[in-house]
Amino acid sequence: MSIYNFTVTTNKGEDVSLGNYKGTVLLIVNTATGCGFTPQYEGLEAMYQKYHDRGFEILDFPCNQFMFQAPGDDAKIDKFCTVKYNTTFPRFKKIKVNGSDAAPLYNYLKENSDGKRIKWNFTKFLIDRDGNIVGRFAPSDTPESIEDKVEAVL
């Protein structure tokens, strides 16, 4: 089993194989629009703009599991992120990251990193070009604080 075996759904309802991202460095993030960490969207977008041309993608998975901080449907979340933070990286359908109905991708990420449940919004997973999880970062780890790790993998 590899990260490339998963199919995820975009916020527009299209299924996408993560196999399409082979050879790309990924930062997978569960996000929320009404969280104290929401301003990290600004840093994420800055990182995306800086490294996208070098084979870097951010995959944004909104999650409403933590104090209902991602209210609204996928279209409303997308509008908020693009208008308020000018985000341009791919956004996917709202998911759950913990519990019996957690997204299979997130079960895989947890099981193949430290095995722990997701504590909060803006937990980040860094994936190298070969699909290996090379870093798991806490919500309090800002995009700026992990940029050197992203750059090292690029």
Image (cartoon, helix red, strand yellow):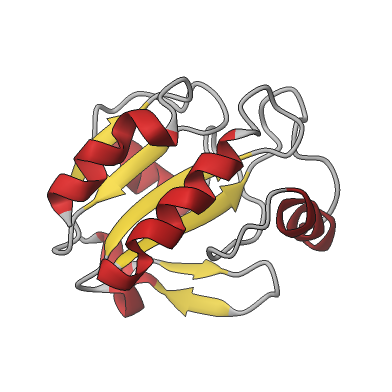
Residue 101 visible here: no
Question: Where is residue 46 shown, x and y percent of the image?
Answer: 48, 50
Judge from the rendering whether residue 135 lies leftward or rightward of residue 140; answer left or right. left
At 32% from the left and 57% from the top, the residue drawn is: 26
Write down the quadrant of residue 129 in the picture.
bottom left
Position in image of residue 34 (x %, y %): 76, 32
- The residue at the point 57 percent across, 30 percent down is 121
Asked if residue 118 is positioned above or below residue 21 in the image, the reply reads above
Q: Is residue 101 left or right of residue 66?
A: left
Q: Which residue is pictured at 57% across the width and 51% down the height?
A: 61
Residue 27 x, y percent position in the rendering = 37, 50
Query: Where does the N terminus fall, quadrant-wise?
Result: bottom left
Marks counted in the figure total: 0
Question: Where the C terminus falls, by quadrant?
Answer: bottom left
Rendered view: 46 above or below 146: below
Viewer-side residue, 29 vs 65: 29
In depth, the one of 91 and 150 nearer the eye is: 150
Q: Is residue 58 above or below residue 42?
A: below
Q: Position of residue 11 (x, y in %)?
A: 68, 67
Q: Is residue 57 left or right of residue 127?
A: right
Q: Is residue 6 visible?
A: yes
> Which residue is pictured at 30% across the width and 39% down the height?
147
Relative side of 145 to 135, left or right: right
